[in-house]
Image (tube, grey):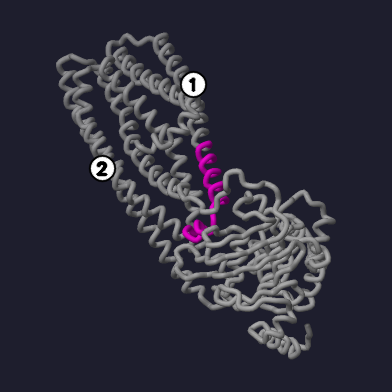
Amino acid sequence: MDIFKRLGWFFKKEKKSYLIGVAGLLIVAILQLIPPRIIGIVVDEIETETLTQQSLLQWLIILTSTAIIQYLLRYMWRVRIWGNAAKLEQIVRRQLYNHFTNMDNVFFQKYRAGDLMAHATNDLRGLRMVAGGGILTMADAISVGLTTLIAMMFIVDLRLTLIAVIPLPFLALTSRLLGRRLHLRFKDAQAAFSQLNDKVQESIQGIKVIKTFGQEKEDVDEFIHQTDNVVQKNKSVYKIDSLFDPAITFIMGISYFLTILVGGLLITDNEISIGDFITFISYIGMLVWPMFAIGRLFNIIERGSASYDRIENLLREDTAINERQGAFEEPVSGTLRFDIESFSYPDDEMVALHHVKFNIDQGQTLGIVGKTGAGKTTIMKLLLREYDTYKGSIHYGGYDIKDYTLDALLKRVGYVPQDNYLFSNTIRENIRFADPTVPQEVVEAAAKLADIHQDILDLPEGYDTKVGERGVSLSGGQKQRISIARAILINPELMILDDSLSAVDAKTEEIILSGLKAIRQNQTTIIAAHRISSVMHAEEIVVIKEGTIVERGRHHDLLEQGGWYKEMYEQQQLERKLEGEDY
């Protein structure tokens, strides 16, 4: 019953609504005692030949009235109790979603998307059942059980009642033992479902790669293996779950046996009437539900407890990116000073960056070049405060970026990564994602600067074209340019292009960079790229190798140094000439 204590915050909040629902259950339980008693009286009147049309009509009116009142009360408690359960599910779902949006990269590296989706679906369903079916079952079992037992003792016969309830303590013991085992097995089943969710999501997102490499059969085999695992784990749950009903049936069978044996003797001795015995048997039948409810209650509780354990484990995860008390809310602007002594990713002993230092005055452009894995994207991640665990400092406008609120920093940064993410919406809504109220002419202006406007007009539905999940219907270059337009639209103080021109040709690249230079004369830009043409016009260019700066200067300065930069420039220039293009 610990789960009810842990959800006490919600039950207190909805106390009035639950009390009304439980009161309705209690009244229904009392009213349910009337029909068996009336049947017993009618049987006795038939036996004694005292039943008249008037008395029969009277009993029928009472039965009908009782049924109508029970119908109305059942409607009332269902609305209250199940309505509250839906509220709990809504509250916890919001808590989870808000928690997900506030967490950092470390969290999403630890938990895969499919696992998080399983928490937000299956686990919430288990929690909802506690607040709905759990409360209902417990309240109904207690009210029906107690009222029925009281009626059996005081309306029929105390001795017969005491005999009939002898087997019932064994039911409580059996339910407790089975419930403990059910809790552990249900946890394993939920974990297996999370793994299956991960597998399905990953396969759907990577379906092009799977088909390209002809791995459909292997992927299906892996899916079947995962599905079999889920089935096996759930079978182990159902093996325990299926023991509840037979145990209850067996124990209730013993109770019926004792009732018939002792009741028959009492009728023979004329200590109870046949009508009393029929009433008592009806009450025994009414006790079947509370007994079944006890087993069902343990089932619901253990499932809900396992689900809440998983949800609480998620909510206990804390982000390493926190706003300082009294952080600046004014938007960032001014000179950017990056001075990192060393940085390593969490749980990775390898140093990702060391002794990286540069300054960018407002309105200037910094170019960052280097091999794949040199550390270019890591610099961007630190600027975006995806990680704060570094030695050194990053100052913007004279203040450490950790002294700003996240909104003050991030809302002034337009970040375009190489792996662009587009939402399964229209092109228009993707471009104006940061501000859905922006008019069409502003959207088109941003698209023109990103050299994607004409491409959009050539599509069948223009700006109303649905891009599909993650922009599946667009080419890599189109996705990059739409992402650039999305960043341009917010007119950011700092624009970061993280190898985001890799999928466009040299001519398109030149058009985009020229357009950005024209409109961003008083704003800062950082361009990380493999292609030298992307950065050659920057006020300063730094070459990153193995996490540190090995060359720096303007384009012509780096050519004169005769290092990696010159080598790459000449190599790429030769490739362009062979392709019939020039820088």
Q: Is residue 96 left or right of residue 476?
A: left
Please state which of residues 550 and 50 is positioned toward the viewer in this rendering: 550
Q: Which mark is residue 177?
A: 2
Seen in the picture, residue 394 relative to 62 is either above or below; the reply is below
- Mark-to-mark CA distance, 2 and 1: 40 Å
Give the magenta range.
87-113
The image quadrant that residue 528 belongs to is: bottom right
Kindly identify the residue that appears in the image at 34 percent across and 32 percent down: 289
Label located before the other in sequence (2 or 1) = 1
Q: Which mark is residue 68?
A: 1
Eye-nearest disc, 2 or 1: 2
The kind of secondary structure element at disc 2 is helix
Q: Main secondary structure of the magenta part?
A: helix
Does 248 lie within the magenta span? no
Please state which of residues 358 and 16 is positioned toward the viewer in this rendering: 358
The image quadrant that residue 129 belongs to is: top left
Q: Position of residue 493 (x, y in %)?
A: 73, 58
Categorize mark 2 by other alpha carbons within 10 Å: few (<14), some (14-19), many (20+): few
Q: How many marks?
A: 2
Q: Do tag 2 and tag 1 residues touch (Cβ < 8 Å)? A: no
